[in-house]
Amino acid sequence: MTKLIFASSLVAVLCGMMRRFLFCFCLLAMAGCSAVHVSRTWRAPEVVPPKKVLVLAVLPTSEQALQANIESHLADDLNCIGYPAVAFRAVSPELIDRNNASATKAQLAAAGFSAVLVVTLLDAKVEKKTMPDELWCSQYNNYNRELNCYLVSLQQKTADVLNPKRRYLWESSLFGADLKLLYSIRLCPGRLEKAKSDRLESFHTIIADMVWQDVLPLPADENANLQDVTH
């Protein structure tokens, strides 16, 4: 009986791994096998899968159209794999108070959000290392493990206009209901024009990595709309 239970558990684990592998393979294949590569990732030892995700893109005010596009696509992709998600532009901007973590936590909880996914473009010349295990080349390096402090640091160092002659990298960070960092990923840098044109492939890569690392385990429901994650 013990052997049967062990065998059953082993099969379940292997099936789960196979589903994750096939999902990530298909997602990256649908992304077009582009030249998007992961630079570094970080994952908290314990991650509770979110029940509802708020997607926030942090970009210069001159990039409002791109910001809306990013939030919409990522929210749609998360919904397609079984994680309810909403673009920040679709909710009240007062939901996140960058200067008041307690208020932010209470407001997110009241709205039913258990996680915030932040996406931003960083200047590769300035941002040399990933968080939080290594020091950033930034005076704000001690503050990036919590959502509010992270957003303040981004606000301080995000230029008013992106420079087309500079190299940029996509960074995405997931924060939990307690506003603590759960996961962070950085993609390899490239010229601004390429970073923008490859953004959908980049976001598919980010989602695939979160699935692979069990930050976003695939739902038990086999009917998650994988085919729709191809925008």
Image (tube, grey):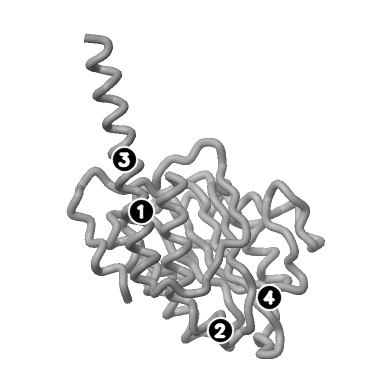
In this rendering, which labeled residue sits more in front, label 4 or label 3?
Answer: 3
Say which element carries label 2.
Answer: helix
Vertical arrangement, residue 200 with respect to residue 110, above or below:
below
Residue type at tag 3: Gly
Dot 1 or dot 3: first in sequence order is 3
Q: Quadrant of residue 12?
A: top left
Q: CA distance from mark 2 to mark 4?
A: 19 Å
171 on left or right of 34: right
Residue type at tag 4: Thr
Q: CA distance from mark 3 to mark 2?
A: 35 Å
Residue for badge 3: 16
Q: Residues within 10 Å of mark 2 (few under 14, many from 20)?
A: few
Say which element carries label 1.
Answer: loop
Say which element carries label 4.
Answer: loop
Residue for badge 4: 158
Quarter of the figure with the C terminus: bottom left
Q: Residue at x 57, y 55 (%)?
A: 184
Q: Tell me the number on the disc at residue 194.
A: 2
Dot 3 or dot 2: first in sequence order is 3
Q: Residues within 10 Å of mark 3 (few under 14, many from 20)?
A: some
Q: Tell me the number on the disc at residue 52.
A: 1
Say which element carries label 3.
Answer: helix
